[in-house]
Image (cartoon, rainbow, N blue to C red):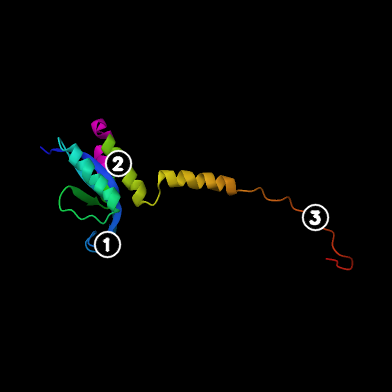
Amino acid sequence: MSDIKGYIYVGKGHDDAAHNGLGADVARFVIVHKGREAEAESLANAFKGDKNHLRVRTGVVQWRSEQVDEQIEKLKSRPDLADTLGQLMRAKADLSGVSAAASSEFGKKAVKAVKPAPAPQHRARPAGLHA
């Protein structure tokens, strides 16, 4: 039986070797093992502080968008892994280019930027011009 308790999403990146060498955007997750939660949190903080330049051999997985979707489907029926499901949903939003905060902020700005169109004004034609 696996001792994996869940995953912590640490950001997205691009892996040139992913998707059979074609390259792809990937979501990076730190693996949380039972009894080693503090170690996983420390590694996640290191990733966040280093802005994805950190290279490690163990404790981190990279999944493409399709793989994240597969993991979400697997965990939908597992209420005990709701935290991990939330991390996967954040990764899915990030990979698709839609961030909940960004879309919310965009919506607020769009509403402020919308101005009512001025009513059309009828102008009299200059004398001598007839249709």
Q: Assign a secondary structure to mark 2.
A: helix
Tell me the quarter of the image containing the N terminus: top left
* Distance CA(mark 3)–CA(mark 1): 58 Å
Compare residues 64 and 99 and report the one nearer the observer.
Answer: 99
Q: Which residue is mark 3?
A: 122
Q: State yes or no: residue 4 in magenta.
A: no
**Secondary element at tag 3:** loop
Residue 5 occupies quadrant: top left
> Residue at point 25% right, 51% down?
63
Nearer to me, 11 or 24: 11
* Amino acid on which disc 3 is placed: His
The prevailing secondary structure element of the residues shown in magenta is helix
User: Label 1 belongs to which residue?
Assistant: 23
Q: Up-down: is 128 above or below 4?
A: below
Instruction: Calculate the distance from the C-alpha at mark 2 to the C-alpha at mark 3.
Output: 58 Å
Residue 4 position in % (x across, y down): 16, 39
In the foreground, 67 or 48 = 48
Considering only order in the chain, which callout, 1 or 3, is on the residue closer to the N terminus? 1
Residue 15 appears at what percent x and percent y? Answer: 26, 59
Q: Is residue 75 magenta?
A: yes
Sequence-first tag of 2 and 3: 2
Q: Residue at label 2?
A: 87
Dot 1 falls on a residue whose secondary structure is: loop
Three-letter amino acid code at the position of disc 1: Gly
Image point (28%, 45%), residue name: 9
For label 3, count other residues whose C-alpha is less than 10 Å away and answer few (under 14), some (14-19) or many (20+). Answer: few
Q: Please give the range of residues in magenta.
A: 70-82
Report the Cα–Cα distance between label 2 and label 1.
23 Å
Where is residue 109 shown, x and y percent of the image? 54, 47
